[in-house]
Amino acid sequence: MSAPLRKVVFPVAGLGTRFLPASKVVAKEMLPVLDKPLIQYAVDEAVDAGADTLVFVTNRYKHAIADYFDTAYELEQKLERSGKQELLAAVRGLIPKHVRCVYVTQSEALGLGHAVLCAKPVVGDEPFGVILPDDLIWNRGAGALRQMAQFAANAETGVIAVEEVPREETQKYGIVDADMTAGRAARVRHVVEKPKPEVAPSNLAIVGRYVLPGRIFELLEKTKPGAGGEIQLTDAIASLLREGEVHAFRFEGTRFDCGSKLGLVKATLHFALQDPALAQATRAFVAASS
Ligand code: UTP
């Protein structure tokens, strides 16, 4: 898989039931951590990895994501007229000029695997990245997807991001069987979606970053509904494993599960503590509240 990673897919067509009632009208990916929505952190990570084509798999209710990345003429004119250059640069610079956005619709929420399959006409037969924006990954150096793309290019392999989770939580994740004792990456022997703790092959959970070959689309087309009655990406990766290599990759960085309320709270606190303008007051508030 030596080609550079040009295309990144963002499956954002889920229902976001854990954020109801807000997610009735506010797409989960538009929830902010400080002043940026989750989707912006994901896009920044994709661009950092070298992507020039961003493929958003949305549903008919999620116009806000396309609106957010679109030009807001009225707002820009107002900011320009009032000399608010910094804010103007912030609303204009969401995506670099050389990067294009493509929107495809998943007409029914049939699962993550099905959402990724919807991107096939845009991605074609080349390696591509997948980012689930509700897994927000923070670090100071190269973003998680860039780390994975570099590894994939050198190892000529599909790569899935993994992280150790408490045993009792295996049922929330795709779980990987791989021997990670030797470093950041290891060949995956087996993957299984949402196993019960007693049958899980390990506590290494797949988190929302993938580098996959175009071949995955043909495998997704043959994938039957699995856990939860959904077409699971993990099941297609299991088929990919029968044909060749896939590596699990333990990225450098801290992941926040912003698909859950607690994860979003933790991310907000973390980013506030990183921000010189907010850190002191946030620390004081937390100390006084606990
Ligand atoms: P989740 O499992 O987090 O589901 O999906 P969800 O619907 O977004 O949220 P909850 O669990 O109901 O609160 C993981 C990722 O897969 C996408 C979601 O948008 C999210 O990025 N997804 C899931 C789709 O795009 N389509 C689907 O049919 C299912």
Image (spheres, helix red, strand yellow):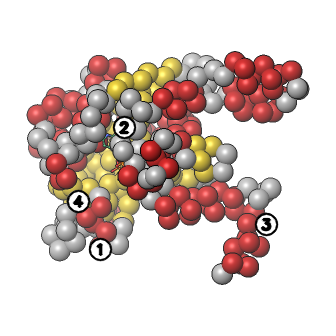
Q: What amino acid is found at the position of numbered circle 4 in the picture?
A: Lys
Left or right: residue 270 versus residue 252 is right
Who comes first in sequence, dot 2 or dot 3? 2
Foreground label between 2 and 3: 2
Cα separation between marks 1 and 4: 11 Å
Who comes first in sequence, dot 1 or dot 2? 2
Q: What amino acid is found at the position of numbered circle 2 in the picture?
A: Ala
Q: Which of the pair 44/79 is nearer the observer?
A: 79
Residue at label 4? 194
Q: What amino acid is found at the position of numbered circle 1 in the picture?
A: Glu
Cα separation between marks 1 and 3: 36 Å
Who comes first in sequence, dot 1 or dot 4? 1
Residue at label 2? 13
| Residue at 20 percent of width and 45 percent of height | 230
Residue at label 3? 281
Q: Secondary structure at mark 4?
A: loop
